[in-house]
Image: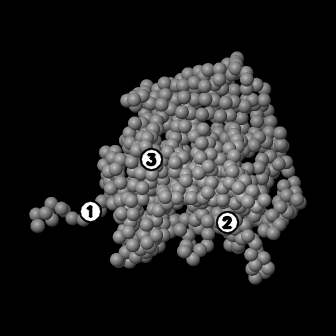
Amino acid sequence: MGLWRFLKSLILINKEVPQSRGMLYPRESETREVRSLDGIWNFVRSDQTNPTQGVREEWYGKDLSRSRPTIPMPVPASYNDITTDNLRDHVGTVWYDRKFFAPRSWAVDQRVWLRFGSVHYEAYVWVNGQKVVKHEIGHLPFEAEVTHLLNYGAENRITVMCDNALIQTTVPQGRITELPNDDGMTIVQSYTFDFFNYAGIHRSVHLYTTPKTFIEEVVITTNLSKDNVGGEVIYSVKFNGSAVNEADNSLYVRAQLYDREGKLVANGTSDEELCGSLQVDNVNPWWPYLMHPEPGYLYQLEVKLHASNDDLLDVYRLKVGVRTLSWSNATFQINGRPVYFRGFGRHEDADVRGKGLDNALMVRDFNLLKWIGANAYRTSHYPYSEESMQFADEHGIMIVDECPSVDAENYNQELLGKHKSSLEQLIHRDRNHPSVVMWSIANEPRTREMNADSYFQLVANLTRSLDKTRPITAAIATPWTDDKAGRFLDIISFNRYNAWYSNTGRLDMVTKKVVEEAVAWNKHYNKPVIMAEYGADTLEGLHLQPAYVWSEEFQTEVFARHFKAFDILRKKGWFIGEFVWNFADFKTAQSYTRVGGNKKGVFTRARQPKASAHLLRKRYFALARELDDSSFPEDLFTYIADMGKVEENT
């Protein structure tokens, strides 16, 4: 029986995953109102040994303060670093609540929705004591209609229970153990991934209204003519209506496209299935940063839903970038031009607020990305905020969009279902962003395990079924000789830390090893190759000459040795990108190998450059000039001497 159970656990079945609906980003219009619930909420932590106590005692049925003493907690923010006690390492459930008024005007011909940008990891939500939604998997939005639960013209209460526990069937995975301590026993959360498991209401909470019959989904794809002069915007709309049956073909959509200056450049009326296309003459394509003088060009698409009698039912507007993607076994192209990725792995991470949405930090990060000459980053290792995706659209920064699967192992049916669901939700959320040019279906999965091949075949097949317009990758750390997932990808991405985790300190063992491994990956799979992670931990202000591990000199030398390898590989035609690990220092679980966190950042956690940032900046702008005929910034090189006089003297 034991053998049978073992063999049965290896068999993975391709089951359907629930399909997301709605979830358009909340935007005001003539027919919609949006209200933020961000601010200071009330907060209670559960007893770690009794995490379901609040549910059993129905804390959601009254103000939290009547069940337990509360403390103030900012939303959005991770709760871990806000207080001065041991809340940082709490395992299990915590509770939030706050009150709000619903205006009387919302009671007339309106529907009201409650939307969360992200709660990590699992959330249960009640409004006025009534359960409205449960959602698992952090970093992704969820919503529920609350029209029938609100007291209009009166006060209402929203209550949230958040559970941060990670086990072997969550995405990402972790383990919960009970260990002896000085007071008896304690619960400990462990995980193999190298970033801190921040938790809480991480992104904005909104109430928004729609008409009774409203635009529920808008799906956009775009095309360009061969000369990039003509463009096409193809749209598909779905509606939700309590008074109109979806099979009723009497509704129609009027679509209008406006350029950056607000000029109408195309308009049209949908067919009976609410689909259509707009032709754009003299189109301004969406280009990545430094590939064109006007990167990140966006049009505004105005979608109006009309009844059969021409009454206006709903209006929704979104930004659209017109571009094409194509790829082969050697290249990746945007708008018919080859792309060479130069960028970063990153984290949503900052002091105090953890993974909480911070607009000031987001703007600073994009300023630094452009200052250093990067054209791309990977959302390692989970979906980033919708606001950051919109910012990437506007600034021409390409995104390798990664789902929350990191260090996946012990593949099983339940894990597969959640992994696939995370990708379905991610693609549903981000499919209209021109900045998203690739889907990453995992980071450093254990792809040598026995059933990794069948597992990732099913994950990749689902991803392609949801979006055939973008290639698929995964950041793989398993040696190519043992990997079982690469054959299901379109682009091979690999992570390797030469001179750091392997051959520590040996700068003479970098260039050749990088070249040899990239060549082996390409030869094995005959696909384009990206180095998705390389780097070295660096303590800011530590200077040692000759270069020594942890010093700024060592990080700079590690980069230079990789640059030499990348230039050798670029000449081969199939090596298409280099991503430094990491953009900025970030927090991890406590470890004797981590002094305050992972220090592989080119920037400090406070977003200030280390010495390597200046070298990398020269590298990235040199590549932009060579490959895309971009110009150098005036401050790229520091004045040294009048070289004409130097030459005269020699």
Q: Is residue 207 visible?
A: no
Q: Residue furthest bottom?
A: 182
Q: What's the CA distance linking mark 3 and mark 2?
A: 42 Å
Residue carrying label 1: 639
Residue carrying label 2: 80
Residues at discs 3 and 2 in contact (Cβ within 8 Å): no
Quadrant that contains the C terminus: bottom left
Judge the density around disc 1: few (<14), some (14-19), many (≥20) Cα neighbours within 10 Å: few
Residue situated in front as seen by the camera: 383 or 57: 383
**Marks 1 and 3, the one that precedes in the sequence:** 3
Which type of secondary structure does the marked residue at label 3 adopt? loop
Residue carrying label 3: 527
Q: Residue type at mark 3?
A: Lys
Please name the residue shown 64% across and 44% down the image.
424
Q: Residue type at mark 2?
A: Asn
Which of the 4 image quadrants contains residue 220?
top right
